[in-house]
Amino acid sequence: MPDQTHADLFELFKEISIIEQLSRVLLEARLPEGLIAPHFTVLNHMIRLGDGRAPIDLARSFQVPKTTMTHTLKGLERHKLVEMRPNPDDGRSKLVYLTDAGRSLRSEVITALGPDFEHFAAGFDMRKVSAILPVLTELRIFLDEDRNGSPPRSDRRSG
Amino acid sequence: MPDQTHADLFELFKEISIIEQLSRVLLEARLPEGLIAPHFTVLNHMIRLGDGRAPIDLARSFQVPKTTMTHTLKGLERHKLVEMRPNPDDGRSKLVYLTDAGRSLRSEVITALGPDFEHFAAGFDMRKVSAILPVLTELRIFLDEDRNGSPPRSDRRSG
DNA sequence: TATATATAGTACGATATCGAACCAATCAAT
DNA sequence: ATTGATTGGTTCGATATCGTACTATATATA
């Protein structure tokens, strides 16, 4: 039997995995037909951190293989939520830009989530959420920086 | 702009989504070829809560469509980590049992994660993990119970 | 008992994820 | 400038996820 530290970490990741799944289902229930969580996540990321990045940068940010990002971006393109332009500084790469429709959709989804959030806040002590948020952020940053030290299993990092 | 409650919840689920993905990559790096996180998760679940349940029960527990669970169990069966027997009490259903190999594998994976956990504990204040764990559990329980009040989008619930 | 409804599981098709292999462009080292 | 290694992106094949539709069995109700 592992020690308490191991047990806590095991439990931590188990709870997080379940919460991720349940919250993903909630999000996807508010997305238009044909879009799933990764599509929305990419839109949100670009609005927050700026568009005009290369797909490979997005793949790194989300820690997914570049083939996966290619596929996700194709979906967003098909729905006219982003558009791809050539990168004037590098003939190999493209740059991803949000369309007006992309920006609008992101806002609409957030609005549509409002009642879900209200319902949540009505049944759960939001002070507890606020209390754990900084730790989760710290945790995410730690894991995110840490992975850059581990050998990648494939082209998940940098190709 | 949504209020602080909305912003916190949005942030909460975003962080959890990222942590889930990073931790899943860590777990899968320790799994044998051909097995991914859901396979391990099902093994772990059966060891903790007992085997001999029907696939539909597992699907409900993990909040995945029953077709997904069928597929996951097929993978576990192919690797001889579980075996399916008919349910003597219900001709429609089967019961899923762990094999010795299944039990062993689960232990081995946990052992293999040991160094990862040690590394983690060396770089992150474990008291913070212990502190947020009860809230995450409470959160998971809330979401999990809450979903039973919402209309399902398909056969994710109960078929 | 007969029939309608509900449930467990599977088959199938569409899309998603991901690793391997590949191409074109870039960069590094002469 | 030439050559070799690296990098961004795509193609392709394997597996995963999920919704729809279907079969078989069970349950409810006439």
Image: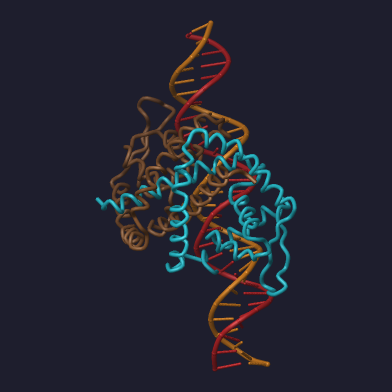
Chain colours: A brown, B cyan, C orange, D red
Which residue is rendered at x = 46% and y = 32% of the image?
A145
**Image check: B17 left or right of A151?**
left
Q: Between D21 and A98, which is closer to the camera in this rendering?
A: A98
Which residue is rendered at x = 75% and y = 53% of the image?
B100
Which residue is rendered at x = 67% and y = 46% of the image?
B107
**Image check: B159 left or right of A86?**
right
- Quadrant occupied by the C terminus of chain B: bottom right
User: On screen, B87 above or below B67?
Assistant: below
Q: Between B33 and B6, which is closer to the camera in this rendering?
A: B6
Q: Between A144 and A63, which is closer to the camera in this rendering?
A: A144
Q: Position of residue D18 (x, y in %)?
A: 51, 59
Q: Position of residue B46 (x, y in %)?
A: 64, 58
Numbered circles on residues, count: 0
User: On screen, B129 above or below B3?
Assistant: above
User: On screen, A24 above or below A141?
Assistant: below
| Residue D22, image quadrant | bottom right
Q: Between A127 and B64, which is closer to the camera in this rendering?
A: A127
Which residue is rendered at x = 49% and y = 30% of the image?
A148
Q: Residue furthest left?
A: B1
Q: Position of residue B96 (x, y in %)?
A: 68, 62
Q: Position of residue A98 (x, y in %)?
A: 32, 42
